[in-house]
Image: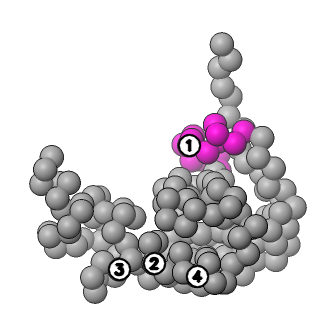
């Protein structure tokens, strides 16, 4: 346990592409680049979403602390996530949204839900000099999708 925690915090083992201890914590992009880009280039009133990924909104909320909390918008093939329980009545329809994804492939799936859809910036995630992954920030004008509604028990 101490060994894994030490590697998570200090990264002394060789970095692998899918290093399970370092999903987003030690990426340079989240704490620095995205925070700076958000502050200088984005409208703070526009909410950021991620499609089928609950970790990106959580890390964005932790590091950037935006006015409107980021959320995960999920398709029917994705497992339930906490955002769907926290915000069961969140209305995103007709709103402009930023979409932050760890794949540029979201373009095909999301553009049908947007009046206009374009990439704003690509972020390369590194630890020291090693490329770990990439994140893509898009703008979606007039979103026509919605949050998935989950069935819950009432006591």
**Residue occupying image coordinates x 57% and y 62%:** 65
| Residue contact at pointers 4 and 3, CB within 8 angstroms | no
Q: Is residue 108 left or right of residue 61?
A: right
Q: Check disc 1 and report the residue beneath it.
A: 81
Protein image colouring: one colour
The quadrant in which residue 106 appears is bottom right
Q: Disc 1 versus disc 2: distance between alpha carbons?
A: 26 Å
The residue under label 3 is 126
On the image, the x and y values in percent for residue 48 come to: 66, 64
Tell whether label 1 touches label 4 (CB within 8 Å): no
Q: Position of residue 135 (x, y in %)?
A: 51, 75
In the rendered structure, does residue 39 fall within the stretch colored magenta? no
Q: Which mark is residue 32?
A: 2
Q: Is residue 77 rendered magenta in the image?
A: yes
Q: Count the labels in the image.
A: 4
Tell me the crowding category of disc 3: few under 14, some 14 to 19, or many 20 or more residues within 10 angstroms, Cα based: some
- Residues rendered magenta in the picture: 75-88
Residue topped by disc 4:
37
Q: Secondary structure at mark 2?
A: helix
Farthest residue in the top direction? 155
């Amino acid at each position: 346990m101490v060994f894994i925690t030490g590697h998570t915090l200090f990264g002394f083992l060789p970095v692998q592409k899918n290093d399970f201890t370092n999903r987003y914590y030690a990426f340079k992009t989240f704490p620095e680049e995205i925070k700076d880009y958000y502050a200088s280039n984005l409208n703070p009133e526009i909410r950021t979403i991620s499609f089928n990924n609950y970790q990106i909104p959580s890390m964005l909320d932790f590091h950037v602390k935006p006015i409107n909390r980021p959320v995960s918008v999920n398709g029917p093939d994705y497992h339930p996530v906490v955002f769907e329980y926290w915000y069961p009545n969140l209305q995103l329809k007709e709103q402009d949204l930023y979409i932050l994804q760890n794949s540029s492939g979201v373009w095909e799936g999301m553009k049908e839900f947007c009046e206009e859809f374009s990439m704003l910036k690509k972020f390369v995630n590194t630890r020291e000099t090693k490329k770990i992954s990439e994140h893509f920030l898009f703008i979606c004008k007039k979103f026509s999708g919605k949050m998935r509604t989950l069935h819950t028990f009432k006591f």
